[in-house]
Amino acid sequence: MVGTLTLRITAVAALGAAFAAAAVASPSAGVPTVKAASNVALGADIVVSSKGLTLYHYLPDTKRAIKCTGPCAILFPPLLISAGAKPVAGPGLAASKLGTVKRPDGKLQVTYNGLTLYRDFYDRSAGQVNGQGQQRAWYAVTPAGSVTKAPANAPAPAESAAAGQPGNTAQPEQPAPATGPAPQPPPLVCVIDDVCIPQSQAQ
């Protein structure tokens, strides 16, 4: 039992080394650190990174204490900025709401309206919101500077514009047979204090 737990914690540490560098934002002139984007799954405008990845806030974080550290910051990497740099607001965001806060490890994390900003390990492309509602503590941030607790809904499939139109004799294309449920993010394994890691990393 102890050996298994040790292996899982070691896997978390290995993930941390792999993703630590990727979490640092290095804004250059004219390139925004964060910007606003419309998210179909949430049905709302949200704050995203320069690459379009959803940014979340961890509700237990406060101005005086950052609670997401260690393994938590591996699954939800904080949006960091280099020392001496200033975050840049992109279209749809208020520059006056941007700021930074020093994390326990001394690194600077970007904030918006005082809300600490994080990415999600499972979000690999723009528009994904796998972190929304996780542990009832992780929520996407809005351009107004608050969080949205809207549930993440899958967009409805687009229908053929030609189907059902008068004078159209072609039969609508039949959907392909279902091959199973839609793919889901890999399951997590909770190792300690409600901290979870990808199951594939915990073997």
Image (cartoon, helix red, strand yellow):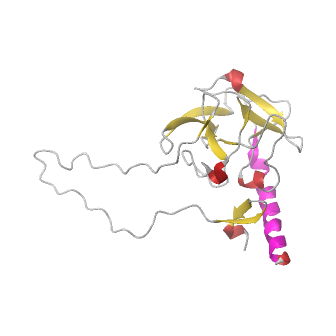
Q: Which part of the image, by quadrant, shows the N terminus?
A: bottom right
Range of magenta residues: 4-25
Work out whether residue 164 or residue 25 is closer to the camera in this orientation and state it: 164
Image position of 34 (left or right of 24): left
At x 64% / y 52%, what residue is drawn?
134
- Give the residue at x 67% y 30%: 31
Rendered view: 201 above or below 121? below
Along the line of sight, which residue is nearer the eye, 191 or 178? 191
Q: Is residue 60 left or right of residue 134?
A: right
Quarter of the image with the C terminus is bottom right
Taking the image as drawn, is residue 162 in sight?
yes
Q: Is residue 5 magenta?
A: yes
Snapshot quadrant of residue 166: top left
Q: Nearer the viewer, residue 85 or 59?
A: 59
Residue 194, relative to residue 47: is it above or below?
Answer: below
Q: Is residue 11 above or below residue 67?
A: below
Is residue 27 among what the camera can see? no
Percent position (x, y) of residue 142? 60, 33
Q: Residue at x 67, y 47 (%)?
A: 137
Dividing the picture into quadrants, the one containing residue 81 is top right
In the image, residue 15 lies at what x, y percent? 77, 60
The image position of residue 112, as x and y in percent, is: 70, 31
Would you say 83 lies left or right of 166 here?
right
- Is the stretch drawn in magenta largely helix, strand or loop? helix
Point 46% across, 51% down: residue: 154
